[in-house]
Amino acid sequence: MERGSVYAFLGPNGAGKSTTIRMLLGLLKPDAGDIELFGQSLKGHRSAILARTGSLVETPSLYPHLTARENLEIVRRILGAPRSEIDRVVSLVGLENRSTHLVKTYSLGMKQRLGLAQALLGGRELLLLDEPMNGLDPAGMTEMRSLIRELPDRHGVTVLLSSHLLSEVEQVATHVGMLSQGELVFQGPALDLGRLRKKRLSIMVTRPDEARALLTTRGWVSDRLGEGLSIETGETHATHVAAINRALVEGGHDVHHLAVESATLEDVFLSMTKAEVR
Amino acid sequence: MMLGRVLLTEFMKIRRTLALAMIVIAPIVIVMLHLMIGLFGPAQATQRTTSFWPVMCRQSVGIWTVLMMPLFLTLETSLLAGVEHADKNWKSILALPAPRWTVYISKLIVATAMLWMAHTVLVTGTLASGWILSVARPTLKIDAMPLDVLVSPMLRVSIAALCATTIQHWVSLRWQSFTAAMGFGMCAMIVGFIAANSSDYGPWVPWSMSMFAIKVTNAANTADTSMQVVFAALAGATLVATLGAFEFSRREIN
C-alpha cells in the first residue's frame, strides 16, 4: 500500500477480507507465512505496530454504559496519548455536542463515527476499516465517506477499507485490491480499474430490428437490449454518437433515447470475481 | 507501565454497572439480615446471657462464605466478562498495543478487588450494625467487639477464595455465553458444598477451600488445616492465572 492512499479492499462475502484484516491486527494467526507492516514482522513487533495502526472491524466495539469521552479515554490511556487527543478526534468526527452522552443513546451512525475516532486517537498512521458502512443509512454512508476521504490529506493517515460493495467505496478509493477466494485478482490504482470500464451507447427507437439492420449496413455492430439497442463504443464515442443519431434520423427512425453509459465498477468487479469463482 | 494503564481502564469500565453495585448490595443483604434479627427478632433471640457479638460475626462470615460468596464470584466474573463479550469488544481491545496477558491479569485483579471490596463492606457493615445494636438493644449484651472473630476469618477467606476466582474468571472470559459461565459457577458451588464434607478431598476443591479456611465444614476429624488451605489456594490461583493468561494470549478472536 502506498502511504497516504485509500486502499479499497474488495471482494464478495466470504472472499477473506475480514480474515485478512483480523490477521493484520493479530487477532487471527495465518496458517502459514508472516505478516509485515511498516517493514516489521507482526510476530516480533506486535505492540509497536498496533501503536501505529487503528482499526474499526465491522460494528464499533464500544461500552454503551460509558460516555463517548470515557470510551475514548480507555483507548487514550492504553496508547499513552496526550489528553488533547480526545478533543482532536471528537472534533474530527463531529461529535463535540454529544461527547458527554452515554453511548447507549447513540444512533448507529454516531457509534460508527465514535469508532472511527477511537481508531484515529493517538495519531495512528494506518487505519484498517472492515466494512465500516455496514448498516448505515444513506446519510450515514455519505458522512463516513467524506470523513474517510479527508484522512490522508488532512491527517496523513493511510486507509485500508474493506467492502463487498464497490459502489460504496469507489468515490473514496485511490487504490483498489480485489480479493476472490483468498486470492488477489486485481491490484492497482483505482484509475486503472476505471480504464477497464467499457462504454456502450444505449439507443431507444420505434422499430429496433429495422434500426439495427440499418446500423449494420453503415458498419456499426449493435445488440438488441430489451426494447432498444446497445452499441459498444471506444474512446471516440462522441463522434460516433452524432453519426449514429444522424443515420437513424435520416433512415426515418424516431430516436427516443440516446445515451453513452459506462459499465459500472460493480460490473467490472463482478466480472473479475465471477471469473475467478468459475 | 502497561499493566498499570490497562488496569486503570478496567476499573473505568465498571462504572455504572450492576457489577459495581453488587459489591455493596451482596454483603449489605447479610448485614441487614442480622440487624433486623437483632432489632426486631423474637425475645429468645434478643434476651441473652452472653454477648450476641461473636454469634453475629460467625453467622455473617459463615453465610457469606458458604452461600453468598460463591454466587457473588460467579455473578461478578460473568458481568465483568460480559462487558467485553456484549459488543464483541475483544476485537477492539486486543487490537490495541497492550500485551494480551495484561488485559487478562488486569481483569482478574479487578475481579479480586471487587471481592475484597465486598469483604470490606461486610466487615464494616457488621461492625456498624453491632454498634447500632449495642445502643438500640442492650439485652443483646454487645460490649467489646472481638475483631478476631470477624477480621481474621475474613482475611483467610479473602485468600482462600482466589483459586475459585481465577478458575471462574477464566471460564467467564473463555465462553461468550453468560449462561455457560453462570451454569459452571452454580455447578461448582454444589460440588463445593458436597466436597466440604470430606476432610480428605474438601481442602483441595477450590469451591470448598474458603469453608475449610474458616472451619465451617461438616468434615469429620478435620485437623486445623485452615492456613494450609489458604496457601494451597494461593498456589492454585497463581497456577491457574498463569495458565489462563498463556491461553488467553494465544486465543484467536473471530
Image (cartoon, coloured by chain):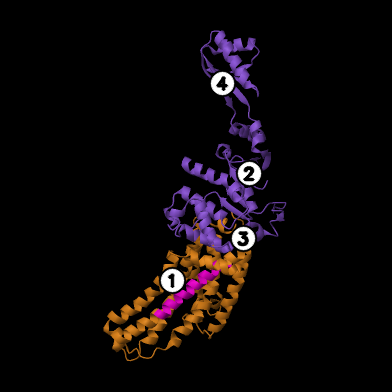
Chain colours: A purple, B orange
Q: Amino acid at mark 1?
A: Ile
Circle 1 crowding by C-alpha within 10 Å: few under 14, some 14–19, many from 20: many
Taking the image as drawn, is residue A61 in sight? no
Figure check: B130 above or below A9:
below
Magenta stretch: includes residue A208? no
Q: CA distance from mark 3 to mark 4?
A: 55 Å
Report the magenta residues as a range: B105-124
Residue of label 4: A202
What residue is rendered at 43% in x and 72% in y?
B68
Which percent across, then down, holds residue A136?
48, 44
Nearest to the observer: residue B49 or residue A84:
A84
- Look at discs 1 and 3 and give the one toward the viewer: 3
Residue tagged 1: B23
Q: Chain of mark 1?
A: B
* Residue at disc 4, secondary structure: strand
Q: Kindly report the distance in space between the C-alpha atoms of the residues bearing marks 4 and 2.
A: 33 Å
Chain at tag 4? A
Tell me the CA gap for discs 2 and 3. 23 Å
Q: Amino acid at mark 4?
A: Ser
- Mark before the other along the chain sequence, 1 or 3: 1
Element under disc 3:
loop
